[in-house]
Image (cartoon, helix red, strand yellow):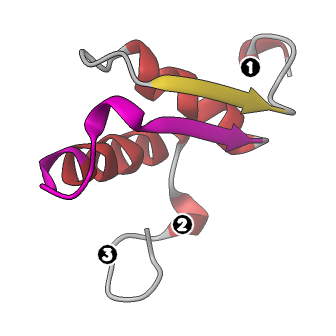
Amino acid sequence: RGFGASTGRADSATIANFADDASAKLAWLRARPDIDPRRLALVGHSEGGMTGPIVAARDAARTRKSAICSRGRPVVFL
């Protein structure tokens, strides 16, 4: 988002926008014939640690995920 030839702005993007981006990337990877979709996993650090669980929760294929140094409390309290 906002880098290279992509559209959008990273500085005004929300966690939901980043989750949409990650979901789109997973769909793209799953569609490639040279990728085994059963071996895909999400790994997120910090803000990505909050994004990954959102993507995994709405992902019908149940992609594995790992969150590293994400929020320890609900965002509403921060």
| Magenta stretch encompasses residue 35 | yes
Please name the residue that numbered disc 1 is placed on: 75
Q: Quadrant of the N terminus?
A: bottom left
The answer to whether residue 10 is left or right of residue 63 is right
Please name the residue that numbered disc 2 is placed on: 10
Provide the secondary structure element on which disc 1 rests.
Answer: helix
Please name the residue that numbered disc 3 is placed on: 7
Query: 60 or 76, which lies in front?
Result: 60
Q: Amino acid at mark 1?
A: Val
Question: How much space separates mark 2 and mark 1, taking CA atoms?
Answer: 20 Å
Residue 61 x, y percent position in the rendering:
26, 19
Provide the secondary structure element on which disc 3 rests.
Answer: loop
Query: 22 or 76, which lies in front?
Result: 22
Closer to the chain start, of discs 3 and 1, is 3
Q: Which residues are magenta?
A: 30-45
Tally the marks.
3
